Image: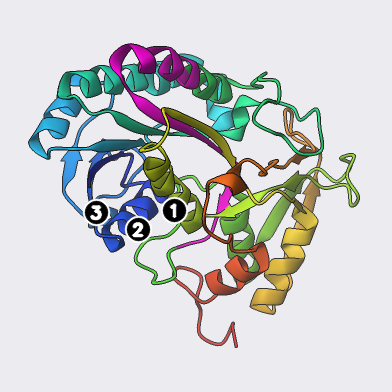
Amino acid sequence: MNVLVTGGAGYIGSHTAKLLRSLGHTPIVLDNLSNGWPEWARFGPLVFGDIRDEETVFRALEAFKVEAVIHFAAKAYVEESTRLPEQYFDNNVGGTIAILKAMQRASVARLVFSSSCAVYGKARTPTMAEDHPKQPANPYGLSKWQCEQIIAEVAPVIGLRYAALRYFNVVGNDPEGEIYERHEPETHVLPNLMKAAQTGGPFTLFGTSHATPDGTAIRDYVYVLDLARAHIQALEVLEQRPSLISNVGLGHGVSVRELVGTVERALKLQVNVVEQPIRAGDPPRLVADNRYLQTWFRHDFADLDQVVRELADTPPYRRPGLVS
């Protein structure tokens, strides 16, 4: 297939584009490069443009005879969304509406939307199933939930088959080192933890008094290439059904303190942990109920220990003499 990948020059989008290419598809990347990297749009054509520009999206769909869209492009910093909510609704919601309009005009009938566990808000149960109440705790999560609702309302009207994948914490890199997790600023826990271990700098651990066994926050960490594969398999599922709404996660959690230990074992280095109070809005536990995922996703997930061990020996983390 020819697949339009919005945000395909970013972290998850570029890994998905590379996997699409390896499976024989042609990814067409649409990205404004505000949070992406042009050198990562190397697995197919790059269309420089903004998802809010319906005409740009339409021309890309038409020019490349696109058969399906995987929609990653979004503003995605939770803290920033609390300061700039109007930008998050304009970009994430407005951009999704523009994509839907362009797809209708171009008669493209399959969409996989990259949603988030942020649509749930605070967990009311040890693991969160797809029917968990939706009470987003920040504008980012609310924008994702609004996008899901809009897609669900528009889809039957325009004859669209769609998937919404609510993924949890994403970790890991392309094992060949061509692309990797790269944010500026870097806010994700594992890259900051790896950097602290290798440089001897401090790793700030926010929250040691959560209601969890070791007091630190528990998260469900999913390997980026497993997540990419789930998006591609969702396109296949849509050949047989009109919609798919599913979590993407391992179904079990790891605490931040356990993650520190995993990195220390992989790098054979000690991390300089600096403990700070719980950040406002940080929930103690976010773990997927992935029973529904297992009914359609035909792939074994990489476990976190395996991901970190491989990560330690791939760019940008590989350092001579540090890993045996």
Determine which quarter of the picture holds residue 55: top left
**Residue at the spot x=88%, y=47% of the render?**
215
Q: Residue 19, which numbered label?
A: 2
Mark 2: which amino acid?
A: Leu
User: Which residue is denoted by mark 3 in the rendering?
Assistant: 25
Q: Is residue 48 left or right of residue 282?
A: left
Between marks 3 and 2, how big is the CA–CA gap? 9 Å
Whichever of callouts 3 and 2 sits on the residue coming sooner in the sequence is: 2
Crowding near pointer 1: few (<14 within 10 Å), some, many (20+)? some
- Magenta-colored span: 147-173
In x, y percent, where is residue 126?
Answer: 81, 38
Crowding near pointer 2: few (<14 within 10 Å), some, many (20+)? some
Q: Is residue 282 above or below residue 266?
A: above
**Which quadrant would the C terminus be assigned to in this image?**
bottom right
Asked if the residues shown at circle 2 and circle 1 are in contact, with their CB atoms under 8 angstroms apart, the answer is yes
Determine which quarter of the picture holds residue 64: top left
Mark 1: which amino acid?
A: Arg
Q: Is residue 299 above or below residue 60?
A: below
